[in-house]
Image (cartoon, helix red, strand yellow):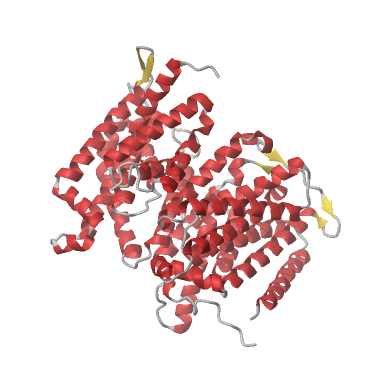
C-alpha cells in the first residue's frame, strides 16, 4: 500500500474515532482518549529508535517534558496557536535527541540507555531551577473555554493529538519500508557487520534519535493546555518513560502495528484502572506486564498472534526483518 | 560571592566522606556492569530496598542499621543469584540482553519503587542510632558522625571486595569471566555459576549501601532515581570494573558535588554527575583507570 493512501486511511479511521467520541456526547471520553493517543505517539516514537535500531531510550519523559516546557516558554513570550507550539516543541526535543545521540551513540548501546536515564534527572534539575517557566512551583496555562468550530477546547486538543498520532504512525511506516528502515534494521541485527559493509551507522542512528526525540517533544507540546497547571514532577513522571517502553514491547517492536496495539490496550487499561482502582496500582500492573512480556513473550502480542496463526515458532526478532511487517492486504 | 577558605576545605572534606559512600553504592554496579557486562539499572532500587529493611528492623527492634544490613546480606545474595538465573535463562541465553534485558531491569526498578510507595507511602523514613546526630569539630572542620561511620564501613567493604576479587579463587574466576568465558570453560569452571555468584555479591552490597543511605539521609522510594546517573557516571569514570578506580571516581564526584552544592546551591548538585558522565563518554570512554 502506498504511504499517501495509508495516510488517508489513517485519517479516515481517526476521523471515525473522533465522530464516535462526539456521538457518545461526554467530554470525559475526549480527556481519556487524549491520553491514549498521546501514548500512541510516544510509543511509536520510542519504537523508531528502540524497535527499529535496537537502542533503548529510558528518557521518554525527558523529551516529553521538553516539548511541554517549550510550550510554556513560548506561551510566556507570546501565546501561540497550538500547532506552532507542537512544531517548536518537536524542534527543541529533536535537537536535544541529536545532541544526546552524538555524545553517546559512538559507544556501546548501553551507554546511550544510561545517558537517557540520567538526562531526565538533569533536565528536571534545570527546569526546577529555571524561574521563567515556573521553576519547582509550576506554571499555569489558562486555556480558553471554547474554540471556534470545535466547541469545547478538549475536542480541539483531542483532534490535534489524533493528527499527531496519525502522522507518527505514517512516519514510522514510511521509515520501515524505506532505505532508512533497512539501514536501521542492519544496525539492530549486527552493527559491526553493518558498519563493515558500508552502512553509515552513526548517521542513521542520529537520524533515528532526532526523529524519535522530536516526535516525543511534539506529543508533549499540547500537554500544558491539557493539564492547565504544569509542574516538573508531572511533566517528568516516570509513567511516561515506563509506558513508552512497555507499550511497544508488549505490542511487538518490529513494525508500526505493535506500538499502536500496545498503546491502545495498555493506555485504555490504565484509564479504566485509574478510575476503578487507583493510579499507583495501575502503574504496578504496567510494570508486571512489562517484565512478564519480555520474559515470556519476547515478540509481544504481534509475535503471539503470528505464532498462533502459523503454528510455527517465531525466530529471534532481529533476524526477520521483511516478514515482520504487517501483511499487505490484497489490493 | 564571598569566598571562604573554611567553606572550601569543609566542602572538600565532606565531598571525600560522601565519596566513600558513593563508592559503596557503586561497588555493585562496578561488579555487575563493569565486570559482568549486565546493565543492572535496577541496582538503586535494591539499595532503597536495603534502606527500607534497615528501617523496618530499626523501627521494630531498635537494631543498628549497619548490623541489620550485614545480617540481611545473605538474603540479598540469594535474591541476586535468583535474578541472575532469570536473566540468564530469559535473555543472555537467547542473546536478547541488549534490549529486553534492559527493559527487564527497568521493569524491576519500577515495580520495586511502586511497591514501596504502595506499602510505605511517599513519606521520608529515617533510622535511629547512637552515631546519628553528634558532630566532631576540630581545626575548623565539621565532621558529622552520621557521614563518617558509613564512610569508614564503606572503605572497609571496598577493601574486602577488592581482596575477594584479587586473592580468592572465586574472585579471580569472576575477573576471568569478564575477559574470556570460553577459556574459563576450558579450565573446567562453569561461567554461568561464576556470574551467578558475582551478581549475587553485587546485589548483596546493595544491602549495606542501603543502610548507609538511610543513615546519611532520610529515604523515600523515589530517592533511588537520583542515584542512577550518579552510579553509572562513577562506574564509567572509574574505568568499568575497577574497584580502586571506582573509589577515586566516587570521591572526585563527591568533591565536585559538594563544591557545587556549597557555592551554587544544592539544587544544582544532581547535574554534576551527569556532566561528568557525558564528558567521560565523549572525551575518555575508558575512564580514569581503564584497562
* Residue A20 visible to an observer of this rendering: yes
Residue B116 place in picture, x, y as percent: 44, 44
Of all residues, the one furthest to the top in this rendering is: B139
Please state, as top left, top right, bottom left or bottom right, where the N terminus of chain A lies in the image: bottom right
Residue A320 place in picture, x, y as percent: 45, 76
Looking at this view, is B142 or B259 the one in front?
B259
The count of marks equals 0
Looking at this view, is A129 or B102 the one in front?
A129
Please tell me in which quadrant of the rendered image residue B141 appears: top left
Of all residues, the one furthest to the bottom in this rendering is: A331
Please tell me in which quadrant of the rendered image residue B164 appears: top left
Looking at this view, is A79 or A197 the one in front?
A197
Q: Is residue B214 left or right of residue A214?
A: left
Please state, as top left, top right, bottom left or bottom right, where the C terminus of chain A lies in the image: bottom right
Please tell me in which quadrant of the rendered image residue B49 appears: top left
Of all residues, the one furthest to the right in this rendering is: A148
B153 lies above or below A280: above
Residue A213 place in picture, x, y as percent: 58, 56
Q: Is residue B273 left or right of residue B238?
A: right
B266 lies above or below A161: above
Q: Is residue A9 left or right of residue A238?
A: right
Residue A11 place in picture, x, y as percent: 72, 71
A157 lies above or below A52: above
Which residue appears at 40% of the width and 40% of the height?
A: B48
Looking at this view, is A24 or B20 the one in front?
B20
Which residue appears at 55% of the width and 73% of the height?
A: A179
B5 lies above or below B70: above
* Residue A269 visible to an observer of this rendering: no
Which residue appears at 14% of the width and 49% of the height?
A: B169
Amino acid at each position: 500500500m502506498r504511504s499517501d493512501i495509508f495516510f488517508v486511511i489513517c485519517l479516515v479511521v481517526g476521523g471515525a474515532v473522533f465522530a464516535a467520541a462526539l456521538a457518545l456526547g461526554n467530554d470525559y471520553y475526549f480527556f481519556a482518549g487524549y491520553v491514549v493517543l498521546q501514548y500512541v505517539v510516544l510509543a511509536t516514537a520510542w519504537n523508531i529508535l528502540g524497535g527499529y535500531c535496537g537502542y533503548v531510550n529510558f528518557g521518554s519523559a525527558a523529551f516529553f517534558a521538553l516539548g511541554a516546557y517549550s510550550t510554556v516558554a513560548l506561551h510566556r513570550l507570546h501565546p501561540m496557536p497550538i500547532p506552532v507550539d507542537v512544531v517548536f516543541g518537536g524542534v527543541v526535543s529533536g535537537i536535544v535527541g541529536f545532541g544526546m545521540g552524538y555524545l553517546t551513540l559512538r559507544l556501546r548501546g548501553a551507554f546511550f540507555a544510561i545517558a537517557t536515564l540520567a538526562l531526565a534527572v538533569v533536565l528536571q534539575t534545570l527546569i526546577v531551577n529555571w524561574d521563567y517557566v515556573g521553576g519547582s512551583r509550576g506554571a499555569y496555562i489558562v486555556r480558553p473555554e471554547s474554540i471556534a468550530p470545535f466547541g469545547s477546547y478538549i475536542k480541539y486538543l483531542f483532534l490535534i493529538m489524533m493528527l499527531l498520532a496519525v502522522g507518527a504512525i505514517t512516519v514510522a511506516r514510511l521509515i520501515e519500508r524505506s532505505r532508512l528502515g533497512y539501514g536501521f534494521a542492519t544496525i539492530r541485527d549486527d552493527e559491526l557487520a553493518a558498519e563493515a559493509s558500508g552502512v553509515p551507522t552513526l548517521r542513521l542512528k542520529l537520524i533515528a534519535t532526532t526523529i524519535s526525540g522530536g516526535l516525543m517533544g511534539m506529543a508533549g507540546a499540547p500537554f500544558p493546555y491539557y493539564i492547565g497547571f504544569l509542574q516538573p514532577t508531572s511533566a517528568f513522571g516516570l509513567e511516561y518513560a515506563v509506558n513508552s517502553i512497555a507499550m511497544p514491547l508488549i505490542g511487538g517492536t518490529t513494525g508500526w502495528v505493535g506500538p499502536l496495539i500496545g498503546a491502545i490496550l495498555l493506555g485504555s487499561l490504565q484509564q479504566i484502572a485509574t478510575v476503578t482502582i487507583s493510579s499507583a496500582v495501575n502503574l504496578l500492573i504496567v510494570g508486571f506486564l512489562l517484565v512478564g512480556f519480555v520474559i515470556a513473550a519476547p515478540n509481544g502480542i504481534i509475535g503471539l498472534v503470528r505464532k498462533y496463526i502459523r503454528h510455527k515458532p517465531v525466530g529471534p526478532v532481529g533476524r526477520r526483518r521483511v516478514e515482520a511487517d504487517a501483511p499487505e492486504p490484497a489490493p | 560571592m564571598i569566598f571562604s577558605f573554611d567553606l572550601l576545605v569543609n566542602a572538600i572534606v565532606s565531598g571525600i566522606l560522601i565519596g566513600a559512600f558513593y563508592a559503596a553504592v557503586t561497588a555493585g554496579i562496578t561488579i555487575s556492569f563493569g565486570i559482568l557486562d549486565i546493565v543492572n539499572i535496577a541496582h538503586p532500587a535494591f539499595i532503597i530496598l536495603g534502606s527500607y529493611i534497615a528501617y523496618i528492623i530499626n523501627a521494630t527492634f531498635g537494631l543498628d542499621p549497619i548490623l541489620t544490613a550485614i545480617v540481611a546480606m545473605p538474603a540479598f545474595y540469594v535474591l541476586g543469584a535468583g535474578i541472575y538465573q532469570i536473566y540468564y535463562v530469559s535473555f543472555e541465553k537467547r542473546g536478547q540482553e541488549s534490549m529486553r534485558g534492559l527493559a527487564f531491569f527497568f521493569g524491576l526498578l519500577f515495580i520495586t519503587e511502586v511497591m514501596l510507595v504502595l506499602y510505605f507511602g511517599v513519606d521520608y523514613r529515617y533510622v535511629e542510632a547512637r552515631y546519628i546526630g553528634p558532630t566532631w569539630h576540630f581545626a575548623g572542620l565539621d565532621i558529622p558522625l552520621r557521614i563518617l561511620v558509613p564512610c569508614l564501613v564503606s572503605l572497609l567493604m571496598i577493601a574486602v571486595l577488592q581482596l575477594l576479587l584479587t586473592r580468592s579463587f572465586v574472585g579471580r574466576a569472576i575477573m576471568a569471566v569478564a575477559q574470556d568465558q570460553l577459556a574459563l570453560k576450558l579450565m573446567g569452571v562453569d561461567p554461568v555459576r561464576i556470574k551467578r555468584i558475582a551478581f549475587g555479591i553485587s546485589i548483596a552490597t546493595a544491602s549495606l549501601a542501603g543502610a548507609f543511605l538511610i543513615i546519611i539521609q532520610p529515604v523515600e522510594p523515589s530517592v533511588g532515581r537520583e542515584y542512577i546517573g550518579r552510579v553509572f557516571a562513577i562506574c564509567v569514570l572509574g574505568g568499568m570494573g575497577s574497584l580502586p578506580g571506582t573509589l577515586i571516581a566516587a570521591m572526585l564526584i563527591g568533591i565536585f558535588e559538594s563544591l557545587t552544592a556549597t557555592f551554587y546551591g544544592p539544587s544544582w548538585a544532581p547535574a554534576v554527575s551527569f556532566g561528568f558522565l557525558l564528558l567521560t563518554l565523549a572525551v575518555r570512554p575508558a575512564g580514569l583507570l581503564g584497562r
